[in-house]
Image (cartoon, rainbow, N blue to C red):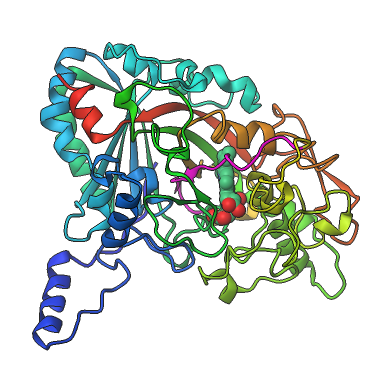
Amino acid sequence: MRLHSFATVLSFSSLSVGLASAANLGRSPVLPKRKASILIDPAAQPDLPTIGEAKAAASAVNLNLTDVQADILLGMKKDKELFFFFSIADAKVFKAKLKTVVLPLVTSTDQILNRTTEPDTMLNIAFSQTGLTALNITDDLGDAPFAGGQLKDIGNLNDPGTTNWVPQFVGTSIHGVILLASGSVDNVNTELATLKTKLGSSIKEVYSLEAAARPGNQQGHEHFGYLDGISNPSVEGFQPTPFPGQAVVPTGEILVGESGDKVQRPAWAKDGSFLVFRQLEQLVPEFNKFLTDNPIRAPGLTAQQGSDLLGARMIGRWKSGAPVFLSPLHDDPVLGGDNQRNNNFTYVEPGQTHTNLTDLASESKCPFSAHIRKTRPRADLGLPEGSSNDGSIQGSSNHHIVRGGIPYGPEVSSDEATSNKTKTERGLAFVAYQSNIVNGFQFLQRRWANNAGFVTGNTGFDPIIGANKGLPRNVSALDLTNPSRTITLTTDFVVSRGGEYFFSPSLSALSKTFSA
Ligand code: N7H
């Protein structure tokens, strides 16, 4: 698979000249919004904290961000990224090289937040259960899906078997993944080449996937065209002030061994996180055809507007990122681009604390089945999230993940657009971090997205990621002119190509437990 050509990134040296002259003039330098960074930073996504803010937040909960791998709390801000899946061929040599070759390159959270310490290429590393075993690390990490591997979890995820899986994900031979991210593919490839030479025959490449933020004004948007990475939780110890509407989660919901993680684990696992990787193919021409063929025929809307409305109600947001709950009939790009407003809603009107799940009117602005409502039901479980859950609804508020994925594959070609058929694979390299896979990714996929009875009665499947083992999926209330109408989807627009569960250890664990 080939990647697009990239814009040249402003070099740090040219930026520092600018800062120096501002300082000489006696003015405080105005820092651009991470212009020189290897990361993307769409205005609509929540900003990363500054290093100062993050350090203050971390010290308040006694967290050492120097010890946490960078990708865990970063979100969907990578520009070019390569996922390099490997097996360990010689554990003894690998352990030695991990310390001398890999560890010095591993990027920490504080490093990525500071433009003066940000590397040209960010590197993170994580291991599967079979990887731990290969390294003779026998402690039980206390997470059943991780211990069994993703293949064994396939029944819980409702994938239709492994027919669509990338063959290398079928089995348990992947011992680890190296994540390389930068502003240029050349940087990524150079870093990988150096690493491969130095690691020599201690590892074997099993599979790799190149990914990149989409070009031009689609930067930050996933392949269906919708802005992504808006609603990640605000993690205590990282972000001092949440953006309006962000879920605030205890550090231990994402980082193992921190406050909020209730599972007994080995001491060395502290400040690591479970990384769920899924290669999710997106059938974009087929999705677009479905929207064209099924416009919502609301009064005053053209067919095109009706199709756009259907897509927006399937996701819960318009392409700009504007939530349908706040802008129910038309996209509102100004709202979508405003990170102070675009996540500030609960699915109930101000003053109400719980959605009336038996009233069809509760879905007039946004269906219960919409992707973002399924995966974060907000007031549907009571406000603050889940706290007034009476037990009649599965789940409570401890089901948050930090999504760190990135699109892969080329733009839709004109041939694909006119034939309404995917000819080259594209999709989302889905990455989620959490301290507990059963409560995190697996819960969202299995108990919510795939569960036609969640959030209530005949809500139906999440039309984007809900899986029914390849069988048709019913979805309710997409049509706001007739909310009791059920639409049956006969195509899965998102196809699982499989993946693996990993553990991304702290830097000190990499140094002490994983190295020799
Ligand atoms: Fe989703 N999409 O384009 O439709 N997702 N997602 N996701 N997703 C979100 O709010 C998408 C997937 C979540 O806090 C947005 O940041 C696609 C999986 C969660 O309100 C968009 C794929 C899982 C949220 C997409 C995919 C989730 C979320 C809106 C696969 C978990 C935040 C942007 C190809 C099992 C909900 C935003 C909240 C948002 C899309 C996968 C979960 C546009 C295409 C597998 C928790």
Quarter holding residue 174: top left
The residue nearer to you, when weighing 467 against 107, is 107
* Magenta region, residue range: 393-411
- x and y, in percent, of residue 387 in the image: 66, 46
Q: Where is residue 92 in the image (x, y as percent from the top left)?
A: 16, 13
**Which residue is pictured at 14% across the width and 38% down the height?**
104
Is 398 inside the magenta-drawn segment? yes
Q: In this view, does 302 lie to the left or right of 3?
A: right
Q: Residue at x 74, y 67 (%)?
A: 328
Tally the marks.
0
Q: Which of the image's four quarters has the C terminus?
A: top left
Tell me if residue 153 can be seen. Answer: yes
Does residue 131 lie above or below 403 as drawn? above
| Whole-percent x, y for residue 41 in the image | 38, 63
As drawn, 154 above or below 430: above
Residue at the (74%, 39%) spot, across then down: 461
Nearest the eye: 211 or 509: 509
- Image position of 225 (left or right of 254): right
Q: Where is residue 95 in the image (x, y as percent from the top left)?
A: 18, 20
133 up-or-down from 395: above or below: above
Quarter of the picture containing the N terminus is top left
Q: Does the magenta stretch include residue 327?
A: no
Q: From where the camera sits, is residue 420 visible?
A: no
**Residue 332 versus residue 272: which sits nearer the camera?**
272
Residue at 63 percent of width and 45 percent of height: 375
Q: Main secondary structure of the magenta part?
A: loop
Side of 182 where 476 appears, left or right: right
Q: In which quarter of the image is residue 360?
A: bottom right
